[in-house]
Amino acid sequence: MNELSELPSTTAFETGPAPAQAQWDSDAQGQILRLAGDWRGRASLPAPPQLADTTAGSHWRIDGSAISHFDSQLAAALWALGKHSGRPLDTSQLPAGLRGILALAASSPGNRGGAASAAPRSRRSRWLTQIGLNWLARLTRTKTTLGFVGEVLQALLRTLRGGSAMRGEDLALQLHATGPASLPIVSLVSFLVGLIIAYMGAAQLQRLGAEAFMADLVTIGVVREIAALMTGIILSGRVGAAFAAQLGSMQANEEVDALRAMGLNPVEHLVLPRVLAMALMAPLLTTYAAVVGMGAGLLVAVGIYQVEMLDYLYRSSQALTLAHAGIGLLKGTVYAILVALAGCRQGLNAGRSAQAVGDATTAAVVQAIVWIVVAASALTIMFQRLGW
């Protein structure tokens, strides 16, 4: 027994740090919270006592000289204690690291006091600031769009000079995705729109006894305006959105950055094949949509309003002039190029998350439709002024 009592004790090494302890106390200077032990993983502090001398504005002292360990949970608990009580805390007796965390939290913009941050900004200044930020964002987007269009034009010029790195396989793949793959939806929409135009037009012409002019109405309307417009809108929802999603996914997966790191131009490899495919397939799709729409008008005229088929075909051939056909093909090509530019522009400038890819796809469709409407208005006014 005597030998065992003489051996050095190992209790201190086996028990580890003392457990966390917290106790409110009071002295001549007021209330004091004494903390001791290991506070890792602990965040609960005892509620302050409701004493008569706890006058508003007086300091609460925190004595943490006996703290052996702590983590951010203790800092959060002390911060909440001072914030909810509305009293300043005297942290001079806390460990230096814990004091630094509390000082950093107090200096953050959301928690900083003072007249500058506490003074409410006027409604007018916030309104003007918001207008300025919106215009700045619009200006930034416009500069990005103009820069992107400039890069596409430079890549196109290099291609015309034979110095482009664009692959023929990429162009062929985009030609198939843009043209033949779009025929079913173009057929359906063009047929229904042609049917609607013929039916509604004939209902108005019938009041005047002029059903024979249905051919003129359907042919000129479909060939000159409707076929190009509907083809552009279909391409914006089907192909333009696909362009934005494909390029946005590549941007999110850093594949575009990998191309740049290898010295390859993403515009030549990714954008130019898509723009050229749209420009090449747009006249064909517009012509096909016009033929389908005229066929739908023929069915309505012959089947419902008893117009002679030969008379309808003769009037259609007389109404279809080279100017109407050329204007329709030009509009269809312009709309398709705008759709391709909007989709590729949004895809290449998308963020690096799934949400950003979805936003870029939505923005591509909206931007393409807005551009189509603006271009349609401008071209219609221009051709009317020219007398074409």
Image (spheres, rainbow, N blue to C red):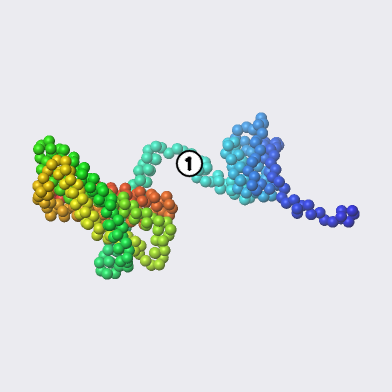
Q: Residue furthest right?
A: 2
Tell me where residue 181 appears, x and y as whole percent: 30, 56
Q: Judge whether residue 259 can be spotted in this image.
A: yes
Report the label total.
1
- Give the quadrant of residue 277: bottom left
Q: Position of residue 145 (x, y in %)?
A: 31, 54
Residue 334 visible, this orientation: no
Residue 166 as seen in the image, left or right of residue 47: left
Q: Residue furthest top?
A: 52
Asked where in the image residue 253 lies, by quadrant, the reply is bottom left
Look at 38% across and 43% down and name the residue there: 129
Count neighbours of disc 1 (C-alpha within 10 A) and say few if under 14, some if 14 to 19, many if 20 or more. few
Residue shown at the point (13%, 39%) measured from the top left:
205
Q: Closest to the observer: 296 or 246? A: 296
In this view, the residue in front, 161 or 225, is: 225
The front one of 264 and 238 is 238
Please determine whether, in this image, residue 100 is positioned above or below residue 259: above
Measuring from the top left, give residue 359's x and y in whole percent.
38, 49
Looking at this view, is 305 or 109 the one in front? 305
**Residue 43 appears in which quarter of the rendering?**
top right
Horizontally, residue 193 falls left or right of residue 21, namely left
Residue 220 shown left or right of residue 97 in the figure: left
Q: Secondary structure at mark 1?
A: helix
- Residue at (69% x, 38% y) in the render: 24
Residue 22: x and y in percent read 69, 41
Write the residue at 16% across / 46% down.
298
Q: Which residue is mark 1?
A: 117
Name which residue type carries label 1.
Answer: Ser
Residue 112 against residue 50 in the figure, above or below: below
